[in-house]
Amino acid sequence: MWLGQLRIRGLRCFREAEFTLDPAINIFTGDNGSGKSSILEAAFLLSHARSFRVGAKEALLRRGSRAMSVFAELRHSDDHSCRVGLGREGARWEARADGQAVTIGHLVSQCAVVCFEPGSHALIAGTADERRRYLDWGVFHVEPDFLPDWRRYQRALKQRNTLLRSAAPGDDELFAPWEAELAQTAQRIDAQRRDYLALLRPLLRASAQGLLPELGSLELKYRRGWPEEQELGQLLREHRGRDQARGHTTIGAHRADWAIAYEHAPMREHLSRGQEKLTALACMLAQAELFAGQRGEWPVVCLDDLASELDQTHQVAVIAQLRAARAQVLLTGTEVPLALKEVPARLFHVEQGRLIPLL
């Protein structure tokens, strides 16, 4: 898939910008702080309904603006196209597809964007939240039942957490229905995640071997959020007192995590910051390749400040892979990276929220 036209209004430093993208490589150059990353952020919003920047929710709106919106013409490899958009006024988000109001889930199911950016190493070195988001985004795009199961789980989790702060732990009549719902939906979510990781694992191993061959073979380890071979419903009953003291549910699918271990770097702490970034890049490329295998087309690939994040050898390798896959690429830098000097691309210059097409 690829984005044809992209229109941005009220996002960060952009009052309004509308431009046409190339189906292949698009390069956005400009000084630091000019707004280059916000263009990638706009595309990412359509796919995730959130920014890839940490703590960016309240900073998305242009200063002095009450509303922001991103609209795009989304084209698919089967020649199907649609118009998608996401807008926010105050705290209220609204999604649209072909002029009709739709749910956020429907919007995200239509548009797929993956991103490698300066904070991507958090996927490896950061909290479990980042890794669950990565995992669940992938599961969502290949498993139709995941979203309704996830929503049911989140509703039951919210209800149990409310009871933990207001009811006695021994009040089975109040807790039992929500704990049963948590246990049933957690089991399904866990199975869906495991199935997805089984598909991802060989692609991730191959991707990591290409980027970090010196670290040896890779193993992907998964923890479901409660002990193996134990029934979650029973554990929830046993842990009510402890959970009440902490004010929240401490076990379940919302506590799942995964980790990568290399043959020559078995612990995360053994990796340098550069190796963390390359591992995160391997994860992004593997997920994009799996998406393409399941859906018949690559997602849009965003590469923020590529020349600062990767050495030239890795830049050349990544761009060659994406060109061979015929993926649409949105790439930023203070100047055109050396690795792309001879690569056909559409070039834009960004100056303080103004976008100027060059080629």
Image: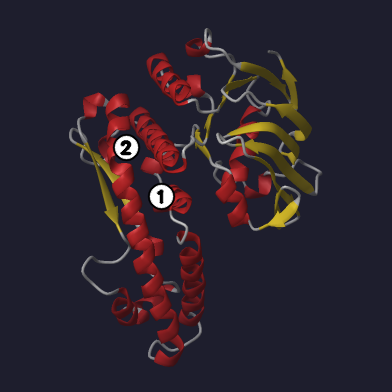
- In this rendered view, identify the residue nearer to me: 347 or 118: 347
Query: What count of labels does the image hold?
Result: 2
Residue drawn where x is 62% and y is 44% of the image: 46
Point out the residue furthest to the top here.
342
In the image: residue 255, left or right of residue 119: left
Determine crowd level at label 1: few under 14, some 14-19, many 20+ residues with C-alpha closer than 10 A. Answer: many
Viewer can see residue 49? no
* Mark pair 1, 2: CA separation: 13 Å
Mark 1: which amino acid? Leu
169 horizontally vs 163: left or right = left
Residue 325: mark in rendering: none
Residue lying farthest front?
78
Q: Is residue 216 left or right of residue 70?
A: left
* Residue 305 visible in the snapshot: yes
Residue at 33% across, 78% down: 233
Residue 226, percent across and down? 29, 66
- Give the label on residue 135, or none: 1
Q: Quadrant of residue 170?
A: bottom left
- Image vertical order of residue 315 relative to residue 218, above or below: above
The quadrant in which the C terminus is found is: top right
Reading the image, the residue beneath label 2 is 204
Q: Quadrant of the N terminus?
A: top right
- Residue type beneath disc 2: Leu
Secondary structure state at the residue bearing disc 1:
helix
Q: Is residue 113 above or below residue 310?
A: below
Relative placement, left or right, of 287 versus 31 is left
Up-down: is 92 above or below 333? below
Identify the residue at horizontal 67%, vertical 31% (top origin). Answer: 4
Mark nearer the N terminus (1 vs 2): 1
